[in-house]
Structure formats: C-alpha cells, structure tokens
Amino acid sequence: MSARPETGGDSDAAEPLGPDEGAAQDGRDRAEDERLRRPLPEQVRARVVEYGSDVLGGMPAGELPPLLRRVARFEPRRRARLAGPQIAAQLETDDDFRGRVAARVDQVWPELAEGLRSGVVPPAADPVAVAACAYLLRPRGWSEIIEGVHAELERQSSVKEADEAVEALDSVRRQLDETRHSHQADLERLRGQIRDQRAEISELRRKVHTERQRAKEAVARAERALTETADRESESATQVSALEAENRRLRSRLAEAEAQVESARRAVRSERNADEARLRVLLDVLVEASHGLRRELALPTSLDSPADHVTEAGREQRRAPLVGLPDDDPGLLEHLLTVPRVHLLVDGYNVTKTGYGTLPLADQRTRLLGSLEGLASRTKAEITCVFDGADVDTPPVIAKPRRVRVLFSASGETADELIVRLVRAEPPGRPIAVVTSDREIVTAVRAAGARAVPSPIFLRGLERRG
C-alpha cells in the first residue's frame, strides 16, 4: 500500500491513500518516468480492452467516464467489440479509470501482480496476460516488460512463419519426388514398349531374311538351270524351251514372294494400328462405365467427420448409452475415457463458471482449453469444446489447441442447441459423453443416447489427472 508524500514543512504523516487511489498515484508517478517506445501488441491491446470492459460494467453510473457511458449498458463482449478504441484511449489518458481496472486485475491475479511489483515475471505465465497486467499496474520497469513481451510475440510469429516455410519446402520436395517417380514409371513403360517393338521388328527382319534366302536359292537354281541349258543347247530345242519356261516360272515365283513379303509388312502395320484403336475404344468404354456407375450409386467425393460438418438430421437415431459408474462417482471421467472411440463434448462456459467463474471470460477459455489440450494428449480421445457465441458477430480470436475442436454457436443459436445437434449428428453405436450441469442439455442428450457428466465431477477428474 503506497502513501502520499509528506508536505513541505509539516512533520506529521500524510493520510494513507485507498487501494485505488494509491494504484492510480503510483501509475501517474511511473508514467512520468516510463513511456512505450511503440504501440501495444494487438493481443495485449485486446486483453487490456477486455479487462476494461469487464470493470466498466460494474462501475456506478455517476463514476463512469463520459465517453463510455453510452456503451456501459452493453454486454461485456459486445462492449469490447464496439467501443474497443474508446476504452483503450480512456485507459491511456484516465489514470483513475486505469486504477480501477488495475485494482480488479490485482484481485484476480494477486500472485502475478505481486511478482510484477517485485520485479519478478513468472516464467510460466501467459506473455499476453503479463503484458496486460504490467500496462495496467505499471510497476517499475513496466515498459521494458511490455517491450520484452512484444519481442517474444514477434519471435513466436517469426518461428511460426519459418515453420510454415519449412512445411511448404517439404511439400514441394514431396511433390518433386512424386513427379520424379511418375516420370521414372513412364520411362520404364516406354522402354518396355520399345523392347516389344524391337522384338517385333527383329521377327519381321528374320522373316524378310528367310524370304531373301529363298529368293537367292531360287535365283541360284535358275542360274544353274541356265547353265545347264547353255550346256545342253546342242541337245534339243525342246529341252531349251522347257528350261526357259521353268526359268520364267521361277522368276514369277520370286515376284510373288516379294509381293508376299510386302503384303506381310502392310498386314503387320495394319494389325498394330487396329490393336491400338481397339485399346483406345476399350479404355473409353471403361472410363464412361466408371462415371456411369458413380452417378448410378451416387458415391460421395469426400469423407468428412460428423462433428466438422453438422447437418440437420431427418430423423432421430438411437445409440447404445454409456453405462457403468454412477454420475457422482469420482472415477467417472477416467472410466469414460477408456471407452474406444469415445467423443467427449464439453459445455465450455458451464464448466468454467462452475470451476473459476471469477476470472474474465478470455482467461476462463484459456484455462479450460489448456486443460483439455493436456487431456487429449494423454488419452488420444476426440474432444469438442462448445462456447456460446450469441450476440457476437464474429467469435473471439483465441489460440486454438491442436488436439481439441473449438466451436462457437452461430448468431441466433445457443450453445445448448449446438451440443444437441452434435450428439444427433454422430452415427448410431458411437459412445458420446457430454460434460454439463445444465438440466435441459442433460435431458436432451440422454434422450439422444449420450451419457451426461456433471461439471464438478469433470473438474475433479481434471485435477487428479493434472
């Protein structure tokens, strides 16, 4: 607790300041010494505006800053969305308003506030929460703390970009390998075709060689006949005529043989072209048949998870409920997570308001999602966390965990209705557990065949596993 400084010649102690006035006075004194060298990071600014929005809703009407009186009656998330720049400007210029918000932060995060005042930043604390608390409390060295968080967020962004670049490079390399393998397969196929064609050409050459040998043999026989005819010219004119006729016959056979060879070549080429045409026709028929079969069977083009694309069910489907331990058994959560292929649906705000409802909504979501991320990592179960997104145009920006599906209900729809739709979208026979203490949700999901788990039992199970 800080006190006002003593006055000039008065030796008596000054009257102590109240908590809000002392925090505001300390903030003004430190603001004279320290300044931010650059604007707050966007995440820190959004967190500071959310803290200011929560405090603004609880202030008396007479103490509200004039610029913020119009939005003070709005719902906190809507107030932070519509009047975020005004709240940020008021926190920067109005020390009393910032003091109130700092006092609220001091109540919610006493250990973090004490550590910041003593110059010790908890290493495991959320950097965004640390920077927001330092900006509001403004302990000694607060600007350096925010600058360090700024550098850490930039480093995380750079690391994320580098990881994305590495993943893109790996993807390109995989595509290059696949293309290389495809080209190698095409090359092997073409080489096989060349080998077949070479074998066919070799066979044709062998046939041509055989025919040529036969033609040479015929020519040789004709030449021998001519020689014999020349030797026997003196014997008889009749024998000469007969030999000439034989010679003409042999020459005719030679021409016929050459014609047969040429016909054989043309027949081979025609046969190969006909085979290729038949193959192309067969492939076209098979492709058209496959398309027709797909249209006839109405086969889907992709497979989606039911919880990712929730559609209106034409009729209610029943499934075998999860049985075993009673609802008040401490080991209920441990028992349900051992069921194969179990889908755990969590009513987000019902659980957080049961376990740690004094925290701001952003911190409630962060704490619950961190616990669910650890639970999903240990059990490998499918976990979906549903938050109420009513009266919000766009869901809040949060760092989504890798193993937990996070859903916000759309405008005009409650989280209760979304949970019931998720239960009914699952196929019959799949075990489903819904964590909630809302009686309407419990009645609806039990009618759909799901097992309801009370929020206090779930929180105790998380504490034992932690």
Image (tube, rainbow, N blue to C red):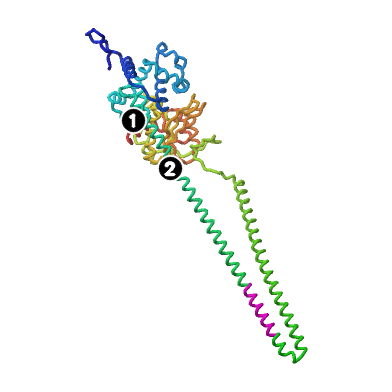
Left/right of residue 410 with respect to residue 6 in the rendered view? right
Q: Return the mark for residue 166.
A: 2
Residue nearer the viewer, 278 or 380:
278
Q: What residue type is labelled 2?
A: Val
Instruction: Give neighbour class at mark 2: few <14, some 14-19, many 20+ (Cα, 10 Å).
Output: few
Above or below for 112 versus 252: above
* Marks 2,1: beta carbons within 8 A: no
Given the current orientation, which residue lies at the most extreme top position? 9
**Which residues lie in the magenta part?**
208-225
Q: Is residue 451 visible in this depiction of the protein?
A: no
Question: Residue 429 location, x and y as percent?
Answer: 47, 41
State the SS at label 1.
loop
Asked which quadrant contains residue 326, the reply is top left
State the SS at label 2.
helix
The residue drawn where x is 59% and y is 44% is 298
The N terminus - image quarter:
top left
The residue drawn where x is 39% and y is 17% is 93
The residue drawn where x is 36% and y is 38% is 334
Of the image marks 2 and 1, the number of the one nearer the N terminus: 1
Residue 92 highlighted magenta (yes or no): no
Residue nearer the viewer, 309 or 61:
61
Question: Residue 345 location, x and y as percent?
Answer: 43, 34
Question: Residue 408 location, x and y as percent?
Answer: 47, 30
The C terminus - image quarter:
top left
Asked which quadrant contains residue 358, the reply is top left
Residue nearer the viewer, 350 or 406:
406
Circle 1 residue: 125
Tally the numbered discs.
2
Asked which quadrant contains residue 60, the reply is top left
Q: What residue type is labelled 1?
A: Ala
